[in-house]
Image (spheres, rainbow, N blue to C red):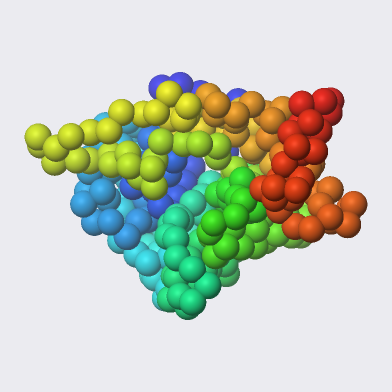
Amino acid sequence: MSKSRNPVFASGNTAVITGGASGIGLALATKCAGYGMNVVIADNNSENLKGAKEMISKSGSGKVETAEMDVGKVEDFESLKAKITNDFGGKISLLVLNAGIGLKSDWSDSAYFHKIMDVNLFGVIHGLNTLLPLTTQSSTPSSIVITGSKQGITNPPGNPAYNASKAAVKTLAEHLSYDLSKSSPSTSVHLLVPGWTFTGLSGNKPFVGEGAEKKEKPKGAWSSEQVVEFLEVKMSEGKFYVICPDNDVSEETDKKRMLWTANDAVQGRPPLTRWREEYKEEAEQWMNNVKI
């Protein structure tokens, strides 16, 4: 059994991962199991949960349990809390609030806004409302990982509800990090911001039926496993912002994009100038010449 430099990834500890039956959540659950951790996988897809449990149970010596739930319902989190209290002693060493969806629609569709916010935003809020006490009750090291998005930072046009949900998640995670630095300094908080990743949202179905065609990972994308490896390194370094590159976009390019976006407000420009025709040439020249 391998050993991590991070004390949170230790045999006998318990990880709770929402959206854990596919993509990044599944890769992280597999890594935790490989360290001998107990893993509780929460997801709304019963077939993926079944496949995930079978696969992860082969990866380590800890217990693997699943919970089919809707993260938009606080009562489902209350049930999850009861399960963790009864079956795992009520102690969470790694809480990963990762569940998310990526619907698209327009300004006239209220249901689209509600659905995105229920899952992407309230899936985090409900998780913290119910499970935070189980994660911060001990003086031993624990960690909380919240999955954000670059779209919640650079705010590209085209999906306002998704961008707004992830911007709100970033703000929540920042506040949580500050508050816990005072009230629970043994609990670290990390905002995971993946780059282009080949997950279920981009067509990677982890448990396709026999004979079904499985998509190939695009060359520019990272695998979920690469994201999780990057996350573990940054957690061990004590980093809050875990902003992942991919095979197309470097860390330097990400920094330039974030800085240009922040400068819209600082310099009094209109919002989203990176995508406005009248600023296109200026933005490209700045990106090419600025040193980070």
- The residue positioned farthest toward the front in the image shown: 278
**Closest to the observer: 158 or 133?**
158
Give the percent coordinates (x, y) of residue 255: 74, 35
Query: Residue at horizontal 79%, vertical 58%?
Result: 270
Quarter of the picture containing the C terminus is top right
- Quadrant of res 170: bottom right
Q: Residue at x 46, y 30 (%)?
A: 221
Picture coordinates of residue 104 (x, y %)?
Answer: 44, 61
Task: Return the x and y of residue 185 as percentages of the image width and height.
Answer: 75, 50
Question: Would residue 193 be found to the left or right of residue 16 on screen?
Answer: right
Can you say whether 167 is above or below 151 in the image? Answer: below
Count every numbered label the image shows and give the total. 0
Would residue 81 be visible to someone looking at this image? no
Q: Name above or below for residue 233 compared with residue 165.
A: above
Outermost residue toward the left in this view:
211
Task: Please indicate, yes or no, whether residue 244 appears anywhere in the rendered image.
Answer: yes
Residue 214: image location, x then y, percent: 23, 33
User: What residue do we see at 32% from left, 39% from top?
Assistant: 204
Quarter of the image where one finds residue 53: top left
Task: Identify the residue at image location x=50%, y=36%.
Answer: 196
- Which is nearer the eye, 15 or 162? 162
